[in-house]
Amino acid sequence: MIKVMISGGSGFIGKNLVEYLEGKYHVLYPSRKDLDLLNTEAVENFMRKEKPDVVIHTANQNTTRNKLATPYDTIYNNLRMYFNLKRSCTYFRKMYYFGSGAEYDMRYYKPFMQEEYLGVHIPVDPYGFSKYIMAQDSLTSPKIYDLVLFGVYGKYEEYERRFISNNICRNLADKDMTINKNVYFDYLYIDDLCSIMEWFIENTPSYKRYNICRGKKIDLLTLAELINSELGKNVPIMIKENGWKSDYTGNNKRLLDEIGNFLFTTESEGIKKLIEFYRNEGFAKKIKEMRII
């Protein structure tokens, strides 16, 4: 049985991957207590002992999520985790890590960015810059592959700040849905990402970098309207700033040429599944009681 090591197994993407892959593979998902990815010797000792076939690196530092993290923390922690794992590459067959559309430079986003757009601009924000450095390094690292994510949504994401989950919860609690400023996103449902990762575990990719996305765009206002529609409600949608931000979308031709036809979950289907998750978890009651949104 293929042994798969997942870093960040308690986070949004990592937790979903663990649930999806367990039973199909021998899955290791050490906690931060069990493995400090910032500790070079600890990483080497773990890899030498376990010798995973495949590493899926989901652990991540982002100042948007962690308000206490400084720009230095973002760059240092992301790069140190990545290079500590790379340093132990003799103990694994291949490693996938999740890059970000931010590595294309948020100042110069354009519709349906292709993988070749990397390097046209160098990001100035700490998160994008750290992802850019990893992306460039992965190109010359035989065992490492950069899987570039744009908008991923689903259960276990941070509903306090993630647009789709946040507004589902607000709607369930009969609160106005909110949009800071409208933008076209390329949203991928988490189950689709997990299914795609199964292909990458089982196969050797032809390229070093792939945009992992639907290759379709949808704006935030339309998503909010879909939430209303799926819930059969007419909760007000408040847009805080007029105008549009730059599209945040990717071209997925390289991915589809590699993995073949893939039936993606539509936004309507994904929202319906996520609504059921939050209903079952009793989030509306929690929101009203705690007033956290």
Image (cartoon, rainbow, N blue to C red):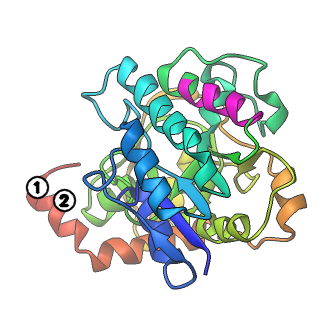
Q: Amino acid at mark 1?
A: Met
Residue at x-position 34% and y-position 54% = 159
- Side of 216 where 166 appears, left or right: left
Answer above or below: position of 110 versus 159: above
Asked whether the viewer can see residue 242, the reply is: yes
Asked whether the viewer can see residue 232, the reply is: no
Quarter of image, res 259: bottom right
Answer above or below: position of 198 versus 157: below
| Residue extent of the magenta highlight | 130-140
Residue at x-position 49% and y-position 27% = 127
Q: What's the mark number on residue 290? A: 1
Answer above or below: position of 197 versus 252: below
Query: Given contact means CB atoms under 8 Å apart, are the residues at marks 2 and 1 in contact?
Result: yes
Residue at x-position 33% and y-position 51% = 35
Q: Main secondary structure of the magenta part?
A: helix
Image location (x, y in percent) of residue 58: 49, 51
Quarter of image, res 249: top right
Q: Amino acid at mark 2?
A: Ile
Tell me the crowding category of disc 1: few under 14, some 14 to 19, or many 20 or more residues within 10 angstroms, Cα based.
few
The residue under label 2 is 287
Q: What's the mark number on residue 148? A: none
In space, the residues marked 2 and 1 are separated at their CA atoms by: 5 Å
Q: Nearer the viewer, residue 104 or 57?
A: 57
Image location (x, y in percent) of residue 79: 50, 30
SS type, badge 1: helix
Quarter of image, res 287: bottom left
